[in-house]
Image: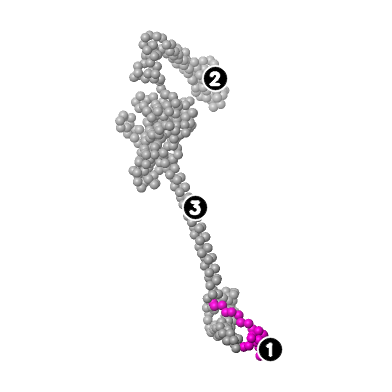
């Protein structure tokens, strides 16, 4: 490798040669600098190569000459060296190139194995974390989808069964309650097959269009997507409706698989205020009215599951008492004994309305307070007779007066008592 041959090559090839030869700082050199560095590298490599090839020959020659020299000369300088004043150089042992490269290669192999093992351990840990996240997500989705009811702590001995009950909680609210067992959910899962993975738990509101007994006509009002872990749901309604609910699963194609159906209720626009308390302790204070609005006392459609639910939660029977439990008292009535069963009835009437703000109002000649918005409300006794109630209002300016006469009559009649038969209760 000469300077002339190097000048004929482009800078790219010279940089590649400098990189191969291990020239430091080759990437920042120009063409002349690269040529000079390569030439110096080549000159520095020639003696080393010559020493490597001739070292073994020189060593062998020195060993042979030492055998022929006297022992005294071997311990010190030779006579020729002493006369010339030269100091002989000691030859260094030559290490083969293969052995010199073996140690770094062995170290690099061990470092590569350590890096590979640490990389595999990191991959294993990452896969374990991902698997745990996937498992947790699957469990969460399963809990959200499952409608299986869990036994309540206060009712551990009570056996769960598939049932749905619908109650009227106000003029604009329905309260649905349900219990679902594990076998019912498994039957739906088997029936849906591959559609089960994308299925959604749904509470379907159905309007009972025809009131004919046997096979009433029903229309789907809407589907309400619910989630697992709950057993009751409030449904808002805005129009009078005769309806029921159906609990089940809906596939992504709209196919519905039912688990249980509720009783039929009538929702009317009454004057009762809305209430959203789901606790049975709050329902107990007004349970008879809620039970009646939900169709509990209806002779046409008496929902047995509704009555069972109310009696289980309130721990008392609903409706009139059973005469079979008081047979001794009924025998006394048959013999003509008077048991002194009292029943007294009184009545009141609420008169309310609205007038001008600041107006002066009297009912039967007595002043009545008028609210800030002009409304008024007063209780009036209703004796057992006919009465005329004049209501007079005068404007705040005193220039106008208006009178309304309210005529009411109360006619109370007490019927003769009689003994209740078993079929009348």
Q: Nearer the viewer, residue 127 or 310?
A: 127
How busy is the neighbourhood of tag 2: few (under 14 within 10 Å), some, or many (20 plus)?
Answer: some
Q: Which mark is residue 368?
A: 2
Alpha carbon separation for disc pair 3 and 2: 75 Å
Query: Residue 28 placed where, x, y %?
Result: 59, 74
Q: Could you say which quadrant of the image residue 319 lies in?
A: top left
Of marks 2 and 1, the one in the foreground: 1
Q: Quadrant of the N terminus?
A: bottom right
> Compared with residue 256, is residue 47 higher up or lower down, i.e. above or below?
below
First of labels 3, 1 by sequence position = 1
Left/right of residue 144 with respect to residue 49 in the rendered view: left
Of marks 3 and 1, the one in the foreground: 1
Q: Residue at x 40, y 41 (%)?
A: 201
Secondary structure beneath dot 1 equals helix
First of labels 3, 2 by sequence position = 3
Q: Residue at x 47, y 33 (%)?
A: 153
Left/right of residue 216 with respect to residue 20 in the rendered view: left
Secondary structure beneath dot 3 equals helix
Which residue position holds label 1?
82
Q: Is residue 72 visible?
A: yes
Which residue position holds label 3?
129
Residue interval drawn in magenta: 69-97
Q: Quadrant of the C terminus?
A: top left
């Amino acid at each position: 490798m000469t300077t002339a041959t190097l000048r004929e090559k482009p800078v790219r090839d010279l940089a590649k040669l400098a990189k191969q030869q291990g020239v430091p700082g080759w990437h920042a050199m120009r063409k002349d600098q690269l040529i000079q560095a390569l030439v110096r590298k080549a000159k520095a490599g020639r003696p080393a190569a010559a020493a490597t090839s001739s070292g073994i020959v020189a060593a062998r020659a020195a060993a042979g000459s030492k055998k022929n020299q006297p022992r005294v000369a071997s311990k010190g300088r030779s006579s020729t060296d002493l006369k010339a004043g030269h100091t002989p150089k000691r030859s260094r042992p030559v290490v083969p190139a293969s052995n010199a490269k073996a140690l770094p290669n062995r170290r690099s192999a061990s470092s590569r194995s350590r890096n590979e093992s640490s990389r595999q351990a990191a991959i294993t840990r990452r896969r374990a974390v991902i698997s745990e996240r996937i498992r947790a997500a699957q469990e969460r989705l399963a809990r959200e989808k499952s409608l299986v009811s869990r036994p309540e702590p206060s009712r551990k001995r009570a056996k769960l069964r598939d049932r749905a009950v619908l109650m009227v909680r106000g003029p604009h609210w329905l309260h649905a309650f349900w219990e679902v067992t594990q076998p019912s959910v498994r039957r739906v899962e088997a029936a849906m097959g591959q559609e089960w993975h994308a299925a959604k738990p749904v509470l379907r509101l159905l309007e009972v269009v025809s009131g004919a007994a046997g096979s009433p006509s029903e229309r789907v009002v809407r589907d309400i997507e619910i989630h697992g872990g709950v057993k009751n749901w409030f449904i808002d309604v805005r129009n009078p409706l005769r309806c029921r609910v159906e609990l089940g699963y809906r596939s992504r194609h709209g196919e519905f698989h039912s688990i249980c159906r509720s009783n039929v209720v009538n929702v009317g626009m009454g004057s009762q205020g809305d209430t959203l308390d789901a606790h049975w302790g709050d329902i107990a204070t007004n349970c008879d009215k809620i039970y009646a609005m939900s169709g509990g006392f209806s002779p046409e459609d008496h929902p047995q599951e509704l009555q069972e639910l109310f009696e289980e939660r309130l721990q008392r029977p609903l409706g009139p008492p059973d005469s079979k439990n008081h047979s001794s008292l009924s025998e006394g009535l048959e013999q003509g004994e008077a048991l002194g069963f009292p029943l007294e009835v009184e009545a009141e009437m609420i008169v309310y309305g609205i007038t001008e703000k600041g107006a002066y109002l009297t009912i039967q000649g007595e002043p009545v307070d008028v609210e800030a918005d002009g409304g008024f409300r007063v209780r009036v006794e209703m004796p057992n007779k006919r009465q005329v109630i004049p209501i007079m209002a005068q404007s705040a300016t005193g220039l106008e007066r208006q009178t309304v006469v309210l005529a009411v009559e109360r006619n109370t009649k007490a019927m003769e008592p009689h003994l209740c038969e078993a079929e009348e209760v």
